[in-house]
Each structure stands twice: as structure tokens, then as C-alpha cells.
Image (cartoon, rainbow, N blue to C red):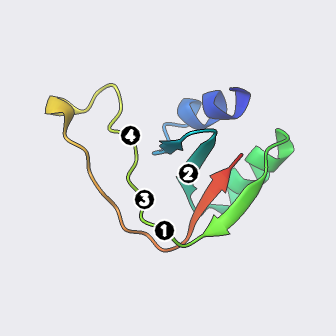
Amino acid sequence: MRIAWHLGNRHLPVQLLGDCIRIRADHVIKAMVEGLGGHVEAIEAPFDPEAGAYASGGHRHTHDDDDDHRPT
């Protein structure tokens, strides 16, 4: 929960997957997540972040980035 708060506080796009949060590759955010006790694993997978509270009409924007990370 603490890691999710810090990611949200930075307004980062995230994809929620069960007990994992998928984020875009970023060495600064990786260091933050690990500093908070999380684990970051580099993966190659589609990235479909949550639309967020201010998205209009529930539209979801899909990104197909190759180097995403999942903090757990």
C-alpha cells in the first residue's frame, strides 16, 4: 500500500495486476520502490495503465512498451 501511495503521489501511470503494480521502466522510480522494501523485476509485456480519476469518459489509453517493471 505504501509503494502504491508513493507512485500515485508522483502521478505515475500504473497497471494494477492482482498483488503487483506494473510501471514503466525508470531507474529513479526503481530505486524508490526498492528503498521502500519492494521488489522490481524487468519484463517485456504490454502496458495498459489505469485511466485515473481525471480521465474523461472512462477512455483507457494503451501503451505497448517493451521494458516495463513490476514492483511487488
x then y, percent, for residue 57: 14, 31
Helix, strand or loop under label 2: strand
Task: Tell me which residue sits at (69%, 49%) in the image.
Answer: 71
Callout 3 environment at 10 Å: few (<14), some (14 to 19), or many (20+)?
many
Check disc 1 and report the residue beneath it: 45
Check disc 3 and report the residue beneath it: 47
Q: Mark 1 or mark 2: name the one nearer the start of the chain.
A: 2
Task: Tell me: 37 left or right of 6.
Answer: right
Helix, strand or loop under label 3: loop
* Residue 50: image tag: 4
Q: Nearer the viewer, residue 39 or 7?
A: 39
Residue 50 vs 46, above or below: the answer is: above
Task: Tell me which residue sits at (42%, 65%) in the image.
Answer: 46
Callout 2 environment at 10 Å: few (<14), some (14 to 19), or many (20+)?
many
Check disc 2 and report the residue beneath it: 22
3D distance between C-alphas at marks 3 and 2: 8 Å
x then y, percent, for residue 42: 66, 68
Dot 1 amino acid type: Ala
Helix, strand or loop under label 1: loop
Is there a contact, CB below 8 Å, between mark 3 and mark 2? yes
Dot 4 amino acid type: Glu
Q: Mark 4 or mark 1: name the one nearer the start of the chain.
A: 1
Is there a contact, CB below 8 Å, between mark 1 and mark 2? yes
x then y, percent, for residue 3: 70, 34
Q: Nearer the viewer, residue 68 or 16?
A: 16
Residue 57 vs 33, above or below: the answer is: above
Dot 3 amino acid type: Phe
3D distance between C-alphas at marks 2 and 4: 10 Å
